[in-house]
């Protein structure tokens, strides 16, 4: 499940992080021009103008008839964030208040429908 920036550079898509006129791209293996940020994570800083594409990717779904963003996946469960804006629904679904007005929970992946990735 993806929820974050991505950049296409030299025909390949990378997880990315913008920083002004530059973008950090990440990959799990060492390669020319990439520096180790931590074990299993290598980074390269590029000017934005060198990128072929840059976007924010968000995964959405429906759970129990309600709209959600998918934040993570673990062992057959999805970490979801409710986007419907109705407090009674958050209570009915037993969601946790992550921040003021932000409700999240774990949904069994088998109960989730309409799983879609959107480029913003």
Image: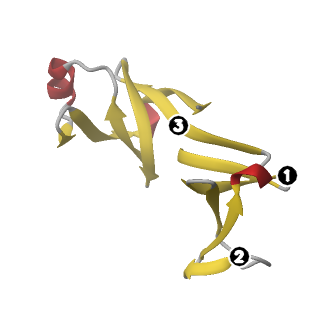
- Horizontal side of 103 relative to 116 (left or right) equals left
Query: How far from the left and from the top, in percent, is residue 53?
Result: 74, 43
Q: Nearer the viewer, residue 54 or 101?
A: 54
- Front label number (3 vs 2): 2
The image position of residue 98, as x and y in percent, is: 21, 44
Residue lying farthest right?
10
What kind of element bears circle 2? loop
To which residue does mark 3 refer?
58
Residue underneath mark 2: 34
Residue at 31%, 20% in the rendered image: 84
Q: Which residue is mark 1?
A: 11
Residue drawn 58% across the image and 31% down it: 120
Residue at position x 36%, y 38% in the image: 80
- Residue drawn at x 62%, y 56% is 15
Return the residue nearer the eye: 66 or 119.
Answer: 119
Element assignment for label 3 = strand
Tell me which label, 1 or 3, sits earlier in the chain: 1
Q: From what the image shows, is residue 75 above or below residue 63?
A: below
């Amino acid at each position: 499940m993806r929820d974050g920036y991505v950049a296409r550079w030299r025909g390949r898509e990378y997880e990315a992080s913008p920083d002004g006129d530059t973008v950090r791209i990440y990959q799990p293996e060492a390669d020319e021009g990439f520096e180790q940020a931590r074990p299993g994570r290598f980074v390269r800083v590029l000017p934005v103008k060198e990128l072929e594409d840059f976007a924010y990717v968000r995964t959405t779904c429906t759970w129990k008839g309600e709209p959600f963003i998918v934040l993570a996946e673990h062992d057959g469960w999805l970490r979801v964030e409710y986007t419907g804006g109705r407090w009674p629904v958050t209570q009915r679904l037993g969601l946790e208040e992550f921040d003021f007005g932000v409700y999240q929970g774990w949904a069994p992946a088998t109960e989730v429908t309409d799983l879609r990735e959107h480029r913003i």
